[in-house]
Image (spheres, rainbow, N blue to C red):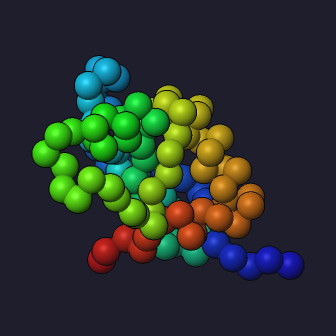
Amino acid sequence: MNSRPRLVSWRFDDEVRSDHPEEWNWIEITMVFTDGSRRWSILYTPERLLNNLSRPDIDPPGLHMKQLIVVRSYEMHDIERVLNVFDEEDKLIEASREYPE
């Protein structure tokens, strides 16, 4: 029997204001697990990630974040599907960080 914490709920920490083609910022989420722990991740759509890395003033011109998850869209059903699959595959803890207390 696997006693690892499982995803109970999640919420946006940032407002998803628009899907304007030039937007480049990520969206942060907080997740709650069965053991009461809270973790956070950064969600990027492919378009926003490309827009970010295409900015002429980005330095360094690359990034690495352990807690980065790329999703097709910021639609709730897409995010829930990704989070649930990652949770089932035991990858969600690895794709998130502990929430600072």
Q: Looking at the image, which residue is at 59% across and 57% down?
A: 8
Q: Is residue 24 left or right of residue 3?
A: left
Residue 59 coordinates in the image, percent (x, y):
18, 56
Residue 43 coordinates in the image, percent (x, y):
43, 47
As drawn, the residue found furthest toward the left would be 57
Q: Looking at the image, which residue is at 31% across and 74% down?
A: 100
Q: Is residue 87 left or right of residue 73?
A: right
Nearer to the camera, 94 or 15? 94
Q: Looking at the image, can residue 40 be seen?
A: no
Q: Looking at the image, which residue is at 27% across and 53% down?
A: 61
Image label count:
0
As drawn, the residue found furthest toward the right would be 1
Nearer to the camera, 57 or 86? 57
Quadrant of res 99:
bottom left
Residue 91 coordinates in the image, percent (x, y):
65, 64
Q: Quadrant of the N terminus?
A: bottom right
Above or below for 67 versus 25: below
Quadrant of res 63:
bottom left
Q: Quadrant of the C terminus?
A: bottom left
Above or below for 39 versus 43: below
Q: Looking at the image, can residue 64 be seen?
A: yes
Residue 98 coordinates in the image, percent (x, y):
42, 74
